[in-house]
Image (cartoon, grey):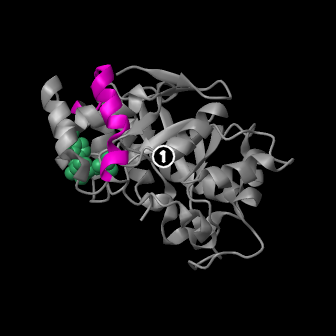
Amino acid sequence: NTKTYTLNNGTVIPAVGLGTWQASEEGAAYNAVKVALQNNYRHIDTAAIYGNEEEVGKGIKDSGVPREEIFVTTKLWNADHRDPASALDASLAKLGLDYVDLYLIHWPVSWKAGTNDNETDWDYVDTYKELQKLVGSGKVKAIGVSNFTKKKLERLLADPEVTVKPAVNQIEAHPLLPQPELYDYLKKNDILLESYSPLGSTDAPLLKNATVQEIAKKNGVEPAALLISWAVQRDAVVLPKSVTDARVIANLKTFTIPDEDFDALNHLAEKVGTTRPNTFSEFIVADEEELASPSYN
Ligand code: A2P
């Protein structure tokens, strides 16, 4: 797949990228990144908290692919919200890069340094304003957010000091968590949706879903290829994670899902129920009212 999107700041981003969360065994991220780039991936997604930025950077370097051809994303961790400039420098040093293509607020929650306790006088809007200052430093091409609900984005965009629109919102999204309201909101606001956990995250539970298996079989593809293609077909970035060479290579290959099957996947969650989104994880205790939606349980 060589599909790309143009972000709202003009930067071009490849639709399929390699996810690296839980690529934590020694050497795994290094190998996956190198294999991916040597097999035509041009988009790598990591984060400070994944603990693999050094390996990702080495993989990029040893792949032989020129830096300017690669789209690299990393993310600001919760405990570093007051000083994104320093956190970014630390990430760049580990990656061995002069810049990242995209820098994201990993979660809309700010922790007191060295703890998991929420800050009371600092939040993600304050953090975002710090991120804005990095634009033009040459160290980031674009900035964005991750795990933001519609409500949080609305609050962010309503702030008069927020002058640079987030380029993306990276969220968990797959046929059992299509997030239709957020999906529409992002489209309307020209914020690109990036889907993580397209296979359902750890151990890829969606590959075992009966409907997914049936549609995949009908089209002569693997369930993983179907799920990755679904994300691309709804005009999202998709970030499948794998540390297995053959899977990394296979996951870049997408196909056009026939309308009726695409439709069936779009409505799957309505029939069998959604999974609980990460967005409502324990990190986001402050916004429990957002759990009120009856479809999430
Ligand atoms: P592994 O990394 O051991 O290859 P997600 O992208 O939704 O987070 O899913 C990641 C999980 O899916 C990992 O357990 C990964 O295993 C597995 N996985 C990734 N690609 C494939 C594939 N093509 N077929 C089967 N399992 C896959």
Residue 92 screen position, x and y as percent: 56, 48
Q: Main secondary structure of the magenta part?
A: helix
Residue 251: percent from left, percent from top = 27, 33
Where is residue 87, by image quadrant?
A: bottom right
Describe residue 194's horizontal placement relative to residue 17 as left or right: right
Q: Is residue 216 above or below residue 194?
A: above
Considering every residue shown, the one lying at the far right of the view is: 160
Q: Quarter of the image containing the N terminus? A: top left
Instruction: Magenta stretch: give its range.
Output: 250-272
Q: Mark 1 packing: few (<14 Cα in 10 Å), some, or many (20+)?
A: some
Please give left or right for residue 33 compared with residue 137 in the image.
Answer: left
Please state the horizontal and vertical placement of residue 205, each as a whole percent of the image: 23, 53
Q: Nearer the viewer, residue 165 or 272?
A: 272
Residue at mark 1: C-beta within 8 A of ligand 1: no
Does the rendering let one see residue 204?
A: no
Residue for badge 1 = 179
Compare residues 70 and 173 and report the one nearer the observer: 173
Q: Position of residue 256 (x, y in %)?
A: 31, 20
